Image (cartoon, rainbow, N blue to C red):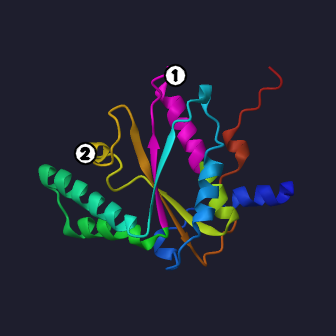
């Protein structure tokens, strides 16, 4: 790959929302390649803290049902239940070809700070984003919905020390990814060559 093409791919990486996906299935081989690339993310002391649960086909319906029920339980307890949100959580996974649950699994064998594990999972997700972009797919990392609701851990089989870090939606799209906007890099760098 030419370095200019690589640089352009990074600059054009964007979140493409499920509303912009076509009703077409992504080939499972591509999903496996996306996950394999995620698996090459940096990981301190080789703890490999990422875990992925892939929801496809009818599995998306089950994910939607679980999300809606978790939300309903929490929202009724807090007194802020919204029927529209309940219905949206049930239907949201059906807008994507695949939904990847992103989990940070704490290492019990090696003691390192949790922030290192979270950073490693973030790097894995960046690899998912870049691979999806390379394939011309839409991708969106959602950390809303039930991500931070405590009952989600038990419902999805996570251990107490693990973290649910969101859901990555993938779909075929006609959206053209173009270079986005950022302030100048010089505004965010302090160069320390002459002290």
**Residue 191: which quarter of the image?**
top right
**Residue 33: which quarter of the image?**
bottom right
**Residue 151: which quarter of the image?**
top left
Counting residues from the N terminus, which is met first, the one under dot 1 or under dot 2?
1
**Front-lying residue, 107 or 164:** 107
Q: Residue at x 71, y 56 (%)?
A: 10
From the image, tell me which residue sits under label 2. Answer: 151
Q: Residue at x 54, y 67 (%)?
A: 16
Q: In the image, which residues are magenta?
A: 98-125
Q: Residue at x 57, y 70 (%)?
A: 26
- Does the magenta portion include 190? no
Which of the image's four quarters has the N terminus? bottom right
**Front-lying residue, 158 or 67:** 158
Q: Position of residue 119 (x, y in %)?
A: 55, 36
From the image, tell me which residue sits under label 1. Answer: 112
Count how many numbered circles sit on residues in the image. 2
The numbered disc on residue 121 is none
Q: CA distance from mark 1 to mark 2?
A: 26 Å
Q: Position of residue 195 (x, y in %)?
A: 80, 19
Q: Position of residue 144 (x, y in %)?
A: 37, 55
Mark 2: secondary structure: helix
Q: Residue furthest right?
A: 2
């Amino acid at each position: 790959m030419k370095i200019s093409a690589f640089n352009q791919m990074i600059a054009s990486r964007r979140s493409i929302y499920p509303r912009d996906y076509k009703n077409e299935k992504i080939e499972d081989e591509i999903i496996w390649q996306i996950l394999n690339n995620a698996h090459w993310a940096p990981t301190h002391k080789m703890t490999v803290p990422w875990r992925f649960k892939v929801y496809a086909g009818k599995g998306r319906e089950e994910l939607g049902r679980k999300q809606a029920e978790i939300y309903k339980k929490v929202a009724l307890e807090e007194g802020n239940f919204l029927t529209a949100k309940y219905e949206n959580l049930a239907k949201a996974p059906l807008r994507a070809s695949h939904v990847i649950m992103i989990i940070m699994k704490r290492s019990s064998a090696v003691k390192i700070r949790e922030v290192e594990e979270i950073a490693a999972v973030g790097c894995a997700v960046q690899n998912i984003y870049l691979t999806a972009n390379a394939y011309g797919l839409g991708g969106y990392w959602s950390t809303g919905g039930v991500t931070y609701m405590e009952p989600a851990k038990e419902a999805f089989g996570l251990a107490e020390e693990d973290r649910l870090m969101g859901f990555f939606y993938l779909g075929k799209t006609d959206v053209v990814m173009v270079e986005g906007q950022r302030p100048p890099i010089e505004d965010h760098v302090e160069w320390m060559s002459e002290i």
